[in-house]
Image (spheres, grey):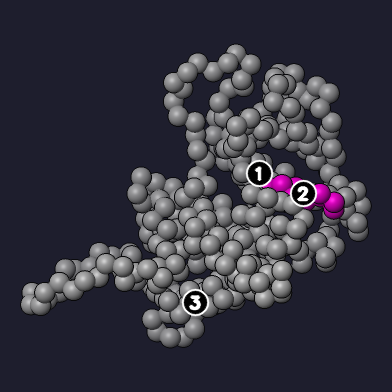
Amino acid sequence: MSFRQTLLGSLFGLGAALSATLFGGVAAAQPAQPPAATTPAPAATPAAPAGMGSGIATGVRGAWVKGSCAAPEAVLYITPRSSAFLPQDGDVKVQRFVGLREAGGWTIATARGAEAPRSMMKLDGNNLSTAEPGPKLRDDAIPGDTPVVSWQRCPSLPASFMLAHGEGLAALGALERLEDGCGVAGRDMRSCIETIVAVADVSGDKLLSPAELARLMRGLAWVITAQEDGSTPSMGAAIGGGMLGGVLAARLMVESYDYDGDGKLSRTELGQDRVALPDGTGSATGSPLRTEGLADGASLLRGLLDTIMGSGNDE
Ligand SMILES: [Ca+2]
């Protein structure tokens, strides 16, 4: 495959991910609680997740290292509702949790999935112990013979690690804030827009520049890829493709909403025609034009924000 084909593939792939998954993923990523039991659960199945409460404890959140700080064997990054496992060799694994409970001194987080995989964690002095019990082990028998891994805090992580994964890990937390600000029923548009600006605004001027939007898109591309396929080649493509595609998509997005032409997006611009209903102004004369199909092609970028902003308002 030529470099050009690779480049185009990366950009198109990212564009598709952006339009279909990125912001749409905010709605899709809402914890899908299993429907009210229509069939009795098997006796060995643990109780249904009781929700996330206030999330994973503050002292457990953040980055943990297995091995030495200078050359980690693996990094574990924990947010209130997610974890990212990043081994030196092997696949990146991101888990989004939907249930949290305590048993035997351990916090047990349950992720989505057919087998409702469990991650156990326990603060042990300055270290964190973790274990991933198999599906058959009952909560009251943990950890049993499940291998326990010990993690330590480090003042910093190697530059190569931060370069590859720093933005993605930041985006994991940003995604949770977006899900809270935009993806929960009852949140209004103003709160959603405030959240988008708060999450994306790095410089603190309450305006979103192309670089700030590109950073968010690169990070979210990392999260999406890590959730779907955390293999090394796949993550490499996401990081490389995200660098280029994120900048292009962000430029187009700014041009699409930048009504005052200052090169940045403000809360007012993001909220234009979304916060307040129009007042019914129009004209009584004239006859309907054909408008079907005009949106094709122009809809991609507008769809991004429309989806994220609409995700909490149509339930
Ligand atoms: Ca800014």
Residue 130 x %, y % = 78, 36
Q: Quadrant of residue 315?
A: top left
- Residue at the outermost left position: 285
- Residue at the outermost top position: 43
Q: Is residue 299 left or right of residue 44?
A: left
Looking at the image, do the residues carrying marks 1 and 3 touch, with CB atoms under 8 Å apart? Answer: no
Residue 277 x %, y % = 25, 64
Residue at x 62% of width, y 72% of height: 8
Can I make out residue 46 in this image?
A: yes
Give me the disc on residue 95. Answer: 1
Q: Is residue 276 left or right of residue 282?
A: right
Residue 264 x %, y % = 49, 79
Tell which of 179 and 190 is nearer to you: 179
Q: CA distance from mark 1 to mark 2?
A: 13 Å
Looking at the image, do the residues carrying marks 2 and 3 touch, with CB atoms under 8 Å apart? Answer: no
Q: Does residue 239 sit above or below 2 in this rendering?
A: above
Q: CA distance from mark 1 to mark 3?
A: 31 Å
Labels 1 and 3: the sequence-earlier one? 1
Q: Please name the residue that numbered disc 2 is placed on.
A: 91
Q: Which quarter of the rendered picture does the N terminus lie within? A: bottom right
Give the structural element (helix, strand or loop) at label 3.
helix
Q: Amino acid at mark 2?
A: Asp
Q: Residues within 10 Å of mark 2 (few under 14, many from 20)?
A: some
Point out the stretch of residues depicted in magenta: 84-94
Q: Please name the residue that numbered disc 3 is placed on.
A: 252
Tell which of 184 and 94 is nearer to you: 94
Residue 261 x %, y % = 43, 86
Give the structural element (helix, strand or loop) at label 2.
loop
Q: Quadrant of residue 182?
A: bottom left
